[in-house]
Amino acid sequence: MIRWCRRWLISSLTFSRVDRVMGRGLPQTIAAAIVMMLMANFLFSTVDTSAKWLMGLGASALQMAFLRYAGHFAISLGLFAWRGKAGPALVTDRVALVILRGGLLVVSTLGNFLALSYLPLTITSAIMFSAPIIVAFLSVQLLGEPVGPWRWSAIILGAVGVMIVIQPFGDDFRWAALLSVFNALTLALYSILTRKLAQTVPTPVLQFYTGAIGTLVFAPMAYLVWQPSADPLVWLCWATLGFSGWAGHELLTRAHAIAPASLLMPFSYSFLIYMTVFDVAIFGFLPDLVEIAGIMVIVMSGLVIWYRGRG
């Protein structure tokens, strides 16, 4: 088993990446990347959990979205200023695409928070994991990437899994599930655009513009629906929205800088585990057998797409 894992690990890395990582010590570097991936997904789960808990107290999804991006923007701007790079470093000749990318994530965040105000964490996160399936489908349409029969089968299977989870033709159908489907679609478009920009635009610049766009879009709307609070726990959750969102993206970026995406992708499903634990511990929700079956189908189809796309 250990030998098989080692062979799989080595085969997942490109030769250049192997040389670079081996120089630092392969096991330690890969372990660090995996830990960062797990931590990033934990932080992302605290964002959604905090937002859902706050909205349960009567706060608006618009206020949650503003706090999420205002914190992100403040930290990004502070780091640029501290490093003395807040001027020319932010200039890019692909500003239109950068703004479009940030806009897609902003719209996705609002759709996700709106869905969370009606649906359990487990259900929204399961539907969100249909995003890689949508990416595989759109990659054919938008990027002209070849997709073989295995991945086409996984795309169809993933769509079936989503249908099982949202149960559109049954009495248990919840319209808010469509918000999560919309969230997955915008996330897929965001991912494709990120892939196109990643080679030419530095990650800190992308982070900065994303935070700035979200803050500017949601500030006036949040002002109209703002719900103040003197509760320290509420303030802690407010801070969590911004800090955990920024820190999660930072850890995710650093993990992919020292290990290939093909190796790290399966660990992204830790997000679903964290969300399920928070759902049970805080909100007392357990998915039923039909929902569990749909979740497993989505996960399996995503893993098939990942496995077939490693080469």
Image (cartoon, rainbow, N blue to C red):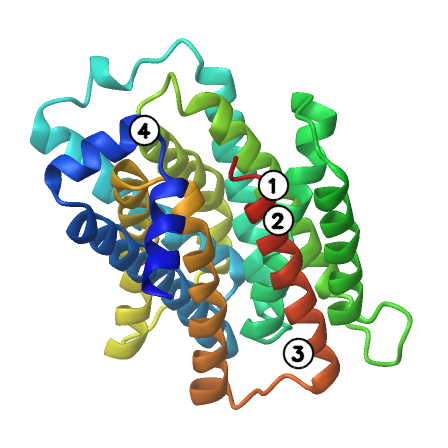
The numbered dot on residue 15 is 4
Could you give the CA–CA distance between mark 1 and mark 2, rounded to whole angstroms?
5 Å
Q: Which residue is outermost to the right?
A: 169
Look at the numbered disc 4 and give the secondary structure of its residue. helix
Could you give the CA–CA distance between mark 2 and mark 4, rounded to whole angstroms?
29 Å
Residue 293, above or below 101:
below
Q: Give the residue pinned by disc 1.
A: 188
Q: Earlier in the sequence, mark 4 or mark 3?
A: 4
Q: Earlier in the sequence, mark 4 or mark 1?
A: 4
In the rendered structure, which amino acid carries the disc numbered 4? Phe
Could you give the CA–CA distance between mark 1 and mark 3, rounded to whole angstroms?
23 Å
Name the residue nearer the viewer: 30 or 193: 30
Name the residue nearer the viewer: 262 or 228: 262
Name the residue rendered at 61%, 62% in the picture.
Answer: 299
Could you give the CA–CA distance between mark 4 and mark 1, rounded to whole angstroms?
29 Å
Q: Quadrant of the N terminus?
A: bottom left
Crowding near the residue tagged with mark 2, few <14, some 14–19, many ≥20 C-alpha atoms within 10 Å: many
Could you give the CA–CA distance between mark 3 and mark 2, rounded to whole angstroms?
18 Å
Mark in the foreground, 2 or 4: 4
Residue 7, above or below 101:
below
Mark in the foreground, 1 or 3: 3
Q: Are marks 2 and 4 in contact (CB under 8 Å)?
A: no
The numbered dot on residue 131 is 2
Q: Are marks 1 and 2 in contact (CB under 8 Å)?
A: yes
Q: Give the residue pinned by disc 3.
A: 292
Crowding near the residue tagged with mark 1, few <14, some 14–19, many ≥20 C-alpha atoms within 10 Å: many
Q: Earlier in the sequence, mark 1 or mark 2?
A: 2
